[in-house]
Image (cartoon, helix red, strand yellow):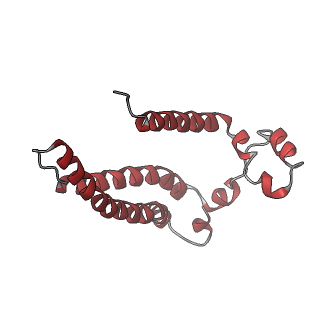
């Protein structure tokens, strides 16, 4: 938002925000491909020795399709708010800020104000956007239950 205030054009603002998302995503996917291949070799050889017969190996198209897909998702997810921010006028960009609407979560902020300062950081923020917080919590909860069920081995 403040890039407009220092003289960036709308196109430069959009490119800067998309780059801020794509650069770490590209580094992460490159590291993921390298580490995934390094860890897959012993796992695939162990699986091949247990089941025998079938030769298991990594395929080249997975090493290209997954990073391209991940970067496309990150790029699209970053482009939508970046286009909105690029269209904002400079005065609106400065005025928008990050403050939540008045009245939302104020009781939580007051209650957290009674706790020691290091404990309060970020605790009242979920109450300013309760629907988003509940959606994230339910998504995290379902992911945890799926992960837990994956690690439980069936009994013979």
Specify whether 117 is left or right of 59: right
Specify whether 133 is left or right of 15: right
Pick out the residue farthest to the right: 114
Residue 61 image point, x, y percent:
19, 53
Q: Quadrant location of residue 135?
A: top right
Eyeballing the image, is 38 above or below 80? Answer: below
Residue 109 image point, x, y percent:
82, 45
Residue 57 image point, x, y percent:
17, 53
Residue 97 image point, x, y percent:
69, 56
Residue toward you, 150 or 18? 150
**Quarter in which the C terminus is drawn:** top left
**Quarter in which the N terminus is drawn:** bottom right
Specify whether 9 is left or right of 40: right
Residue toward you, 101 or 30? 30
Question: In the image, what residue occupies the spot 35% across and 52% down?
Answer: 70
Q: Quadrant location of residue 108?
A: top right
Eyeballing the image, is 12 above or below 100? Answer: below
């Amino acid at each position: 938002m403040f890039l407009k205030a220092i003289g960036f054009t709308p196109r430069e603002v959009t490119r800067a925000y998309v780059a801020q998302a794509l650069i770490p995503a590209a580094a992460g996917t490159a590291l993921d491909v390298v580490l995934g291949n390094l860890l897959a070799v012993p796992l695939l050889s162990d699986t091949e020795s247990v089941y025998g017969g079938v030769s298991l190996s990594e395929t080249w198209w997975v090493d290209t399709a997954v990073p391209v897909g991940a970067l496309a998702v990150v790029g699209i997810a970053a482009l939508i708010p970046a286009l909105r921010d690029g269209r904002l006028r400079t005065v609106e960009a400065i005025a928008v800020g990050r403050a939540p609407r008045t009245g939302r979560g104020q009781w939580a902020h007051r209650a957290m104000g009674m706790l020691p300062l290091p404990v309060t950081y970020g605790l009242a923020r979920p109450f300013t956007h309760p629907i988003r917080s509940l959606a994230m919590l339910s998504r995290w909860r379902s992911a945890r239950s799926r992960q837990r069920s994956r690690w439980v081995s069936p009994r013979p």
